[in-house]
Image (spheres, rainbow, N blue to C red):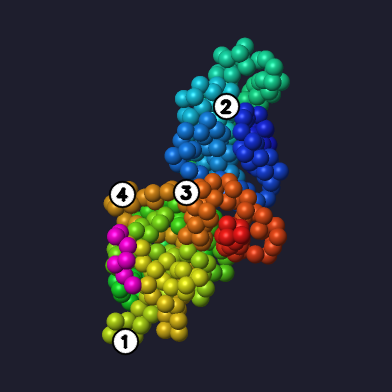
Amino acid sequence: MTPISKTLIGLLKIEDTIMERVRTSIVSSFDDIKALRRILTRQCDNRDETNCFRCEQEGVCFFMNGVLQYKLGAIGEAVKTLEAASRYFRGQGDVWNGILGRAMLASVHEANGEAHKAQPEYQKALDALTADHLRLHWTEYDEKALILQNLLDDQIKGCDKQAAKAQPSARTRQKAARPITRLTVPWMRAYSGYYASPNGPTQSEHAQRESGVYIDEIILGDRPHRIFSLWRGDNLLSLTEGKTYIWAKVSGDSMSAAKPVPINEDDFVLYYATNSADDGAIVVASCPDALGSGYQSVVKRFSKANRLLISETDPPGLYEPMPVNGNINIIGVVIAVAKPENGAEDESPKTGPHAPRGGASRYIELIRLVQGDSAVAERLIDYQQALSPQSSREECIERAIAELIRDRRA
C-alpha cells in the first residue's frame, strides 16, 4: 500500500464502529498480505446485498474493499469498486468522502502506471475540495482539508512529470510499448473431446501454476470462456505453488443449481488434485461407470459429516447421493468454473463475491442459528480460532455450531 492510500484511509469519515475496526485492521496490517486477504474475505462474507444497499456506510465499505483489492493486486476490481464508492458518496451528497474516493481511485491508476488516468481524477478531487473548501475548512476538517489539498497538489505534479517522461519523440513513437496494467492469462490449453462430468469419462490437462492470477478470458476447446471463482465469485484465482491444477469439461446437469456458481453442460471446472476436501466443497470424484467396465468422474457437493456426494439441481433430489467409500473416491477440489462467453452473462453468480468460502453449507447453518447476523457468526468463529489456533476455519465453524446447539438444549 502506498503512503497516499494509507493517508486517504486515515482521512475517511467513518460513523460506524464496525467499519472503524476495519480501517484500523487495514492500517495495522498493510504490509501483511495474508492478513489483508483475510480482512477482504471477511468483508465479502459479511455482506448482505439487501441490507447493505440500505446501509449508510455502503460507500465506506466499497472504499475499504477497493483498497484491499488494490493491495492484493486485483487492479481491475479495485477500480470498479472505488468507482462505485465515489458514485455512492456523490449520490449521498457526501462531499468529503467523495473527494477521498476520487483521490483513492486516482492513486490506484497512478500506481498502475496510468498517470494519464490518474491526473484527471486528482484534478477533479482538488477542484471539488477547492470549491467546497469554505464548508470543509472547519472543526474536524480544518487540518484534514489542508493535508488533503497539499497531498493532491503533490500528486498532480507527480503525474505531470510521469506524463512528460512517458511521451516518446516522434521518431521513436512507434516503438513505445503500452504499460502493463495487470497480470492477465489470456488462455490455457485444454484438449477438446475429453470430458469430466456427472455422467461421463474424464481426461485432464494440467493448468499453469501461478499465485493470485487475474484471468480476463481463457480459451478452452477453441472457445473463449469467462472465469468464476467459487470462493469469490469473480475472476481472481489464488493458485498455490506445488499443487496440480486440472481443467475438465462437464457434461450433464447434476450441478446446475450449485451455489455460488451453477455448473452446466459444456462448462469447464478447474480443480486441484487431492484425496480430501472440506465440508461443503465442490469436488471431482472417481466412481465405477454404469457398465461396471471402468471408471468415470463426477462433480458433486461433498458432505463431510455424512461422507456423501450430493447433486444440486432445481428441483432438488433428481439424483441420489453417492457414498464416499472404497469404490468412490475424491480426486480433486473445484476452485473455479469457466463458462462459454455467449452464456456467461446469464449464469453469473447470484451472490457475487460475497458467498461464504469453504464449508459453505455449514457456514450458512451457523448464520441461520444466529438469526442471520453474520457479524455474530464471525465473532463465534474467531473465538473458536482463539481457543484452538491450529484449527481450520471449517473446524471452528463446526465447533461454533455445536456450542450453539448445546446451549439451546441446556
Q: CA distance from mark 2 to mark 4?
A: 34 Å
Specify the amino acid type for callout 4: Asp
Location of the C terminus (image quadrant): bottom right
Specify the amino acid type for callout 2: Asn
The residue depicted at 51 percent of the width and 48 percent of the height is 371
Q: Earlier in the sequence, mark 4 or mark 1?
A: 1
Q: Earlier in the sequence, mark 4 or mark 3?
A: 4
Which segment is the magenta one? 314-320
Judged left or right of residue 333, residue 322 is left
Q: Count neighbours of disc 2 (C-alpha within 10 A) and say few if under 14, some if 14 to 19, many if 20 or more.
A: many
Specify the amino acid type for callout 3: Pro
Q: Count neighbours of disc 1 (C-alpha within 10 A) and say few if under 14, some if 14 to 19, many if 20 or more.
A: few
Q: CA distance from mark 4 to mark 1?
A: 37 Å
Judging depth in this view, the residue of 223 and 262 nearest the camera is 262
- For disc 4, the marked residue is 346
- For disc 2, the marked residue is 97
Q: CA distance from mark 4 to mark 3?
A: 16 Å
